Amino acid sequence: MQQALIGVIGGSGLYQMEALQQATEHALDTPYGKPSDVIVTGLLHDVPVAFLARHGRGHRLIPSEVPYRANIHALKQLGVRYLMSMSAVGSLREEIRPLDMVLPDQFIDLTRRRDATFFGDGAVAHVSMAQPVCARVGDALARAIAEVNLADPDEPIQVHRGGTYVCIEGPQFSTQAESRWYRSMGAHVIGMTNMPEAKLAREAQIAYATLAMVTDFDCWHPCEEHVTAQLAIANLFRNAERAQKIAAAAIRIIAAELAPSIAHDALASALVTQPGAMSLDTLRRLGPLIGI
């Protein structure tokens, strides 16, 4: 099976990576079912890359239907060690405007219906999520945005480093009361897909960071249009071309440095049940994640 060092998960409006060369589709299966769609591997800057459309091509899955465990497990099977999540978000702050981009470094998980761990059923682990984002991958994305801005100074991308992403269940957008509540928590952006994705990436020992593309002001803003699917998708498509360029530049930066991440040995101090105490079925299920 073709291996890939770096993975990209495309969110709403990002269903393919146009620059991939020698693209090959993989219809993988996992102990947690099938991923959202085929995973496409190929080369970008001569770097092996894997791309997955989070909602499936054609956008067929609501956030709660995304098979998060299968997605991360399949990417791990392909050898992914660094993962960039491209995600549409709403802004909860005046200074973060539609079409801006945010590199959040914290999450608040308000989802309720999603399987959020690979563990249980014969194996116990408690990974640290104190620093849920890999700073190295986040830094590569920031440097990539700077490169894109240098190449196109007439329409610079406004980027915000750091901040908190609050993840809701969806698929409905927030009430105004909820939107104001999220602001009172200190959250900066709101989305529906980065949890449990970030938790599962950490359990799989994959370095993870999000490129959050702002499409709207949710519904808290007294003067701006309330979010609709039409508004969000329209703004996301406006950012899609730039997102492709950012991903390509970040892939080149990551591959040139291959910096170690706190995620790469996340299970070293988290795995309570040692492999020798696991059943064969449990070892087969978790083997790619724990390196067996």
Image (tube, rainbow, N blue to C red):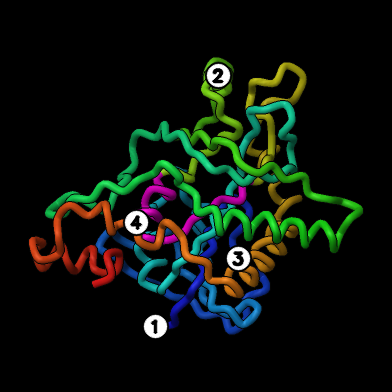
Cα separation between marks 4 and 2: 31 Å
Q: Of callouts 3 and 2, which one flags the residue occurring earlier in the amino acid sequence?
A: 3
Q: CA distance from mark 3 to mark 2?
A: 36 Å
Q: Which mark is residue 266?
A: 4
Task: Say which amino acid is labelled 2.
Answer: Ser
Chain part drawn in magenta: 196-212
- Residue type (three-letter) at the residue carrying disc 3: Gln
> How far is the residue under mark 2 from the one under mark 1?
48 Å
Q: Identify the residue position indicated by label 2 in the image.
A: 184
Judged by depth in the image, the label closer to the viewer, 3 or 2, is 2
Instruction: Find disc 3 in the rendering and name its residue.
Output: 16
Question: Element under label 2?
Answer: helix
Answer whether labels 1 and 3 touch (C-beta < 8 Å).
no
Q: Residue 254 is drawn in which quadrant?
A: bottom right
Crowdedness of circle 2 by 10 Å Cα count: few (<14), some, many (20+)? Answer: few
Q: Residue at x 44, y 82 (%)?
A: 2
**What's the residue type where badge 1 is placed?**
Met
Q: Quick one: label 4 or label 3, which is nearer the N terminus?
A: 3
Q: Residue at x 10, y 62 (%)?
A: 278
Cα gap from disc 4 to disc 3, whole angstroms: 30 Å
Residue at the spot of label 1: 1
Dot placed on the residue nearer the N-terminal end, 1 or 3:
1
Q: Which quarter shows the C terminus?
A: bottom left
Residue 92 spot, x, y in % from top left: 63, 28
- The numbered mark at residue 101 is none
